[in-house]
Amino acid sequence: MKKQGVILVIATLMAVILCGAASAADSSTIGGEGNISDVNSSEVDPILWVDVGYEYDDDINPDITVTDSANNSVAFDKIKYSDTLYKLNFTYAGVTNGTVFNVMVSAPGYITQIKPVTVNQAGTDPEFIGTADFDMVATDNYRLGREITAKADELLDFDNADDVLCITTAGLAYRNGTTTEDCLEGILNGSHGEISYGQGNLLTFQSIRTDPLDFCFVVRNGSSLLAAFFKNGTLTPAYLGTFSAIDQALWENTITPTLGEHAFGYVSLANAWKEGLSTDILRQAAYHGHVCLGTISGQAMVSLLLKYFPPGVYGDDGELEATNYRAVGVPGNSDDDTYVYSLDLTTGKRSYVGYATDEDNLVGFIRWCAATNKGTLIIMRFNEQAVLQLYGSNPYTGIAGELAFNTWLIDKFENDPDSLVEILYVFDNITAEVHNNLTGGVDSKNVVTDALGLDVDYILGLGLTNIADQRVATTYSTGNLTPEQIKEIGTKAVQEAIKQFEFDGINLMDYVDSSKLTVFTSAGYVRVNGQVMDMTMAGIYEILGSRLSRATLLPVHTARYNQLYFQFSLEKDGEVISKTIYYDPDSGNLTAQNKSACSIEGVLLYDPPYDSLMAWLWHNHICGGSSPGYLITNYIYDTFPIGEDESYSLISTSVSCRDDIYTYLLGVSPGGGSYYSQRMTKDSTGNDILIFSVYDSVTNTRRVAIINYTGPTFDTTAEDYNSYEEYIKLYWGDTSSPNLISAPAMSLSADTYVTEEEWNTIISGGNASGNALDYIKGLPVRTKEELIRMQGGSENPNGGSTSQGTSTGSSTSGSLIGSSNGSNTSRFASGSVGDSGANVSAATETTTTPAAGSGAAYEVTKASSEGVDNTPWGTYAVLGVLSVLVLAGVGFFFKGNMFGK
């Protein structure tokens, strides 16, 4: 960045400064009268001038910290004089010429730097002054995001396009051992406002650590879509061409081979975006992997559920994991992912239970009322054949026909969602016993019986009266706020937060762009009078610089119908201060409370890995039950590393809050057919918490294992004990805490290769006993080679397989109208980027620290990995003597407009 507000250096002044400093040093040695040495034992006010420049044209207010030579934190006032120049004032006792302070500067997308700064006097001036110049170096991931965005802009001409979209695997995907949120930051800054969270035109696939780092930019001009696809972090586009006028030859010969098995995800999302599909539904479709009949039909189910069976106050009994609905589904038909996402019915909150049953395309919703201890059971389905008949005979062929069908579906969903979904049964006043039998337990924390799942024979055998034809529609208000008015809600929320912090003597504007200020919000998930609230995030960013890619503006997963709030959490003096601003949709007023709306701020002080923080957002709170999830995630990645032709599936048996963590980070989901929730009692599971599968699509083989988990134990009586701090140390592979009595232990209770027939029995709940764990333990132990021979095939050295039979685990690159089915693969489990070993920390220039997944902070029976040494801060570049600064360009810092061209 070209530095603005240049510091004027006058040669003669510099000479005076240097001579004066030397003279002062000499005279202080002899104790001359009136020297500053006379007051060295008193507190003085040193001044540090810090000049910060950036590799790119970035206007970022940096985080600056100061410590003394003993590494004690020094409090200071920071005054900004120009885009690069900062004056740090503080009081410190015992300062002499040559006293050294350590100044650390960090900024989003840049490698943190630390430099020793020596303070000296200028002549007889009583002030001690030091100067430091920082030329910030971008992280590799930030640089990649900027450069790929610049290349895409060059090819697609963002400024002259009607609209711009970016779809990427960046974020949770690893590159060189680190998460890749800096790539997202690079995209946002590099697009100069054309792409932003507020506009909802940055879509991130629910990727996993080993996914390729792909970027797809799309511009719309009228009804035409032009795309540039960059594969695996390369700057040369692998594909540059149309996403709208796609014929079958282009699809089969160019797009599919180039974009890979997820080609339909990119194309279907871009075309749905062109058709104006709501941004929150686009994000849900990106979470699932594509737009299809199941995706849209699932959204129609959500619409009908809220229309005919509104949530009211159901489920509001003070329980942390309580949700207004429970879903009992059949994994594998895309629709499951929609209500898990849009209604916050996550598996870790025990709000979703799903076995593979014969009830294809069915889902049961339970609306429970804690006050009456009764509920309503609603069973819906999307009838694929009925929808196709509604569309017309022989509706389409090939990719062009499928995209046209999706366009029709979107219009039908937005104008007549009832036509896409059938409400088959409604049973009112169901008892706790029925609820327990279907889900395992009304109380999300306590399992009272092994769940049946969606057992229609059991349900119909209860003799309940079907009142589906008696449903009455609820009328909702429809909002008409403009994007600028929605943005203004975010702006006013910031203004109100500033007032609230002023009561505590804190100027929130001192924390612009700061990692110490985090805004948690329900925006991005909730709707207000049917309108999405994405643009509120633009108002927050414009004032505070808070952003998801900086982990400082965090959308908290919640149901679509919940309240819009903004929680401002500031880390200060070893604690977190939170103020929450709530929006009233009826009056448009904001109200403030001195409390948090979510509890996630409780981990901010302990530097959680980025991906663990994202998973906690998905769970929508932190709790002891979720804490082991990241350890289990690391164990799975270490024990079951996968290649580009392999994918994960998971069956949870001992369902807990931790499920939300590892399912989110492993990219498995009910709608993808890669996650099943078979909620069972402790008597049925013991310490066997889940069944894990790795499917190889080339050899058509499946490895199945049972993971046994015993949690860590700590000295909870220790004065400095904090559960989240202890767990986060383990996340980073650090087992040095004196409060750690025993590390978590994980082992495999079973490990074998199974046939597809056996797998289908497992995902259906096992044999007649209904216990998949017992069923697996009764299977013979086989190797991969033995299974291939048993199936009548042999491994093909060219990457194929002559095994007999077909797999339900591979995704299709043709028609996706039937949605994902069977044991579908992880949506982006192809390819590997970088190294999944020790991560390079972006916290320093010269040292490495153990990163997420790098060191095994647990004991293992079958597979082990070495811990990673915690390397302390290294020695940094020595600061040269700089001139005293003559200042110009005084002014406050304001963020520029992030929109507009």
Image (cartoon, helix red, strand yellow):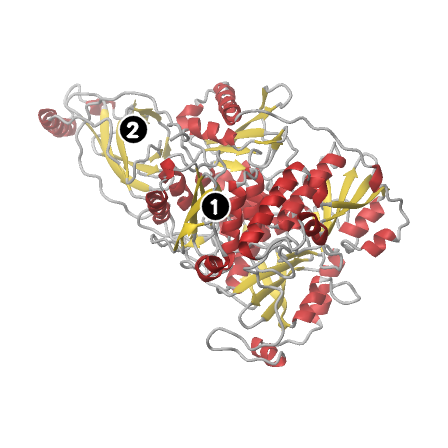
- Report the amino acid beneath label 2: Asp
The residue indicated by pointer 1 is 610
Nearer to us in this view, 141 or 738: 141
Q: On the rendered structure, is 162 left or right of 876?
A: right
How far across and down, in percent of the image, does residue 580 sit? 56, 27
Q: Quadrant of the C terminus?
A: top left
How far across and down, in percent of the image, does residue 6 sit? 21, 28
The residue indicated by pointer 2 is 83
The answer to which quarter of the image holds residue 53 is top left
Any part of residue 720 in sight: no
Residue 127 marker:
none
How far across and down, in percent of the image, does residue 14 sit? 12, 28
Residue placed at 57% from the left, 48% from the top?
A: 404
Residue placed at 31% from the left, 41% from the top?
A: 113
- First in sequence, mark 2 or 1: give its number: 2
Residue placed at 64% from the left, 76% from the top?
A: 781
